[in-house]
């Protein structure tokens, strides 16, 4: 019995020694690679995140188990990238895409470089690039090397074809006939030309305004104000104006033409978005294509009336008819608006619920943390499809938050400062967890 006990003791001692040297080896190996700081910061035992390195698995890191699931509309990321799922994205594809783009953006080892092909309308390109730089500040070291083209216009550029692969192009919107990759638009960081603030302070102001004026105390009509001629004399907005109040008909719509030239002269006193939430119903209607106004309308607590949409941005596929908004027939607008408003006024509880659901979607699923998370996952999933090593473009300009803001003045600089991300200061230090693709979509 003593000999058996001695053998067991020696075996146990041997196991302890082997484990000790194994753990010591792992520690020394990681020390040589990363230094001991990484061990002090990590939250998951024996899991080391390769901070600052290009990793195609960064969006599926160990953080995913500790983060909440992203909103359902994030699933569309998989669908939007599906054309390149099998072939991958080659350097030739990216080069070919430059003829449709306003600028090319390359991320290399955490640094950002831009090659401008043409100036976009107003400051769309500036604030889009600014937004990407803020993403890199929010999640430092977690955006992999990238090479992408971006178009800042209204209409999609890449027509869908069954005969050839599309070139990858990031845009603000797409539709069922296009393969543009929807990306958050510039207005989330501000639109200085018409004095629209960055999304975080503006959304907070709208939400505070909602508390001051309850739905039942708002005007019992459907409201819209905008530029009716943005899509031409025969566009849907011009046709919508026929639903306005006249001596002969009242379709329960109150529609107003926005004169931006006059507004600039008068200091934008009549275009405060917070002041627009005084009606029980707010109309959303596309212009030349999609409109940035959709998020402002949904945030109002008023029941949103969405005229049949032909385009989608990155989040609008996540809102549901009769839950977040009432649909309006594009071919029978006046009667559809009138019928919906009359129904809501006679069924106020249902109409209020629709308004609340819409604004709750905005508050919960479209705050800036979620916008940055969408950008984070979209760019990480895009990077996994790249089949070449990104390199500097022909005429690169290195940009940073400091270099961009230092050369700006007035509202442009103010909106940059107001939307500047302070690293690790957000309510969430890790992105939400990307949900899987829709069943059968891949």
Image (cartoon, rainbow, N blue to C red):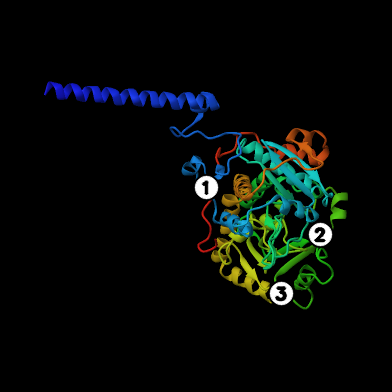
Q: Position of residue 75 (x, y in %)?
A: 56, 56
Question: Callout 3: few (<14), some (14-19), or many (20+) C-alpha neighbours within 10 Å?
Answer: many
Q: Residue 433, which numbered label?
A: 1
User: Which image quadrant is residue 80 in?
Assistant: bottom right
In the displayed structure, 395 sits above or below 354; it is above
Residue 353 x, y percent position in the rendering:
55, 61
Q: In the displayed structure, would residue 379 be above or below residue 320?
A: above
Q: Give the number of the disc on residue 52.
A: none
Give the side of residue 257 with respect to residue 334, left or right: right
Tell us which disc is closer to us: 3 or 1: 1
Q: Mark 2 points at which residue?
A: 258
Numbered disc 2: secondary structure: loop
Q: Is residue 28 left or right of residue 295?
A: left
Residue at 55% from the left image edge and 34% from the top image edge = 50
- Residue visible at 20% across and 25% down in the picture: 8
Task: From the viewer's perspective, tell me whether residue 157 is left or right of residue 261.
Answer: left
Specify which label sits upstream in the sequence, 2 or 3.
Answer: 2
Specify the label residue 334 is tagged with.
3
Identify the mark nearer the N-term, 3 or 1. Answer: 3
Please give left or right for residue 14 compared with residue 131 in the image: left
Percent x, y for residue 386? 64, 49
- Nearest the viewer among 247 and 157 is 157
- Residue 319 visible in the current orientation: yes
Residue 163 placed where, x, y %? 69, 67
10 Å crowding of disc 2: few (<14), some (14-19), many (20+)? some
Of the numbered discs 1 and 2, the one sitting upstream in the chain is 2
């Amino acid at each position: 019995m003593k000999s058996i006990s001695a053998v067991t003791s020696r075996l146990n001692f041997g196991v302890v020694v082997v484990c000790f040297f194994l753990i010591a080896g792992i520690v020394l190996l990681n020390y040589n690679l990363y230094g001991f700081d990484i061990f002090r910061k990590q939250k998951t035992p024996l899991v080391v995140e390769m901070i600052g390195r290009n990793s195609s698995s960064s969006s599926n890191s160990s953080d995913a188990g500790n983060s909440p699931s992203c909103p359902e509309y994030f699933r569309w990321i998989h669908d939007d990238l599906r054309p390149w799922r099998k072939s991958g994205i080659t350097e030739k594809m990216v080069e070919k895409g430059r003829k449709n783009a306003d600028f090319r953006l390359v991320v290399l080892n955490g640094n950002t470089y831009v090659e401008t092909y043409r100036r976009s309308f107003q400051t769309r390109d500036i604030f889009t690039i600014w937004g990407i730089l803020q993403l890199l500040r929010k999640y430092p070291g977690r955006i992999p090397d990238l090479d992408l083209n971006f178009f800042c216009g209204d209409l999609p550029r890449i027509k869908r074809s069954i005969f050839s692969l599309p070139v990858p192009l990031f845009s603000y919107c797409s539709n069922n006939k296009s393969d543009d990759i929807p990306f958050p638009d510039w207005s989330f960081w501000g639109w200085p030309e018409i004095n629209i603030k960055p999304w975080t302070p503006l959304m907070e102001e709208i939400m505070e305004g909602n508390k001051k004026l309850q739905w039942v105390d708002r005007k019992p009509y459907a409201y819209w104000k905008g530029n009716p001629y943005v899509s031409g004399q025969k566009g849907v907005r011009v046709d919508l104006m026929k639903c306005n109040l006249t001596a002969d008909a009242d379709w329960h719509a109150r529609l107003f033409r926005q004169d931006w030239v006059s507004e600039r002269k008068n200091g934008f006193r009549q275009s405060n978005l917070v002041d627009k939430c005084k009606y029980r119903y707010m109309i959303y209607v596309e212009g030349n294509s999609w409109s940035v106004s959709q998020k402002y309308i949904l945030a109002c607590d008023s029941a949103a009336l969405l005229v049949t949409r032909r385009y989608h941005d990155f989040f609008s596929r996540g809102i549901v008819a009769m839950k977040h908004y009432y649909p309006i027939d594009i071919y029978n607008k006046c009667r559809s608006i009138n019928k919906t408003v009359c129904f809501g006024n006679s069924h106020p509880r249902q109409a209020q619920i629709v308004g609340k659901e819409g604004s709750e979607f905005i508050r919960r699923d479209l705050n800036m943390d979620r916008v940055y998370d969408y950008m984070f996952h979209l760019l990480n999933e895009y990077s996994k499809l790249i089949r070449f090593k990104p390199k500097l473009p022909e005429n690169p300009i290195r940009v940073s938050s400091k270099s961009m803001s230092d050369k700006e003045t007035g509202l442009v600089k103010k909106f940059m400062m107001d939307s500047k991300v302070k690293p690790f200061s957000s309510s969430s230090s890790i992105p939400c967890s990307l949900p899987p693709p829709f069943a059968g979509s891949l």
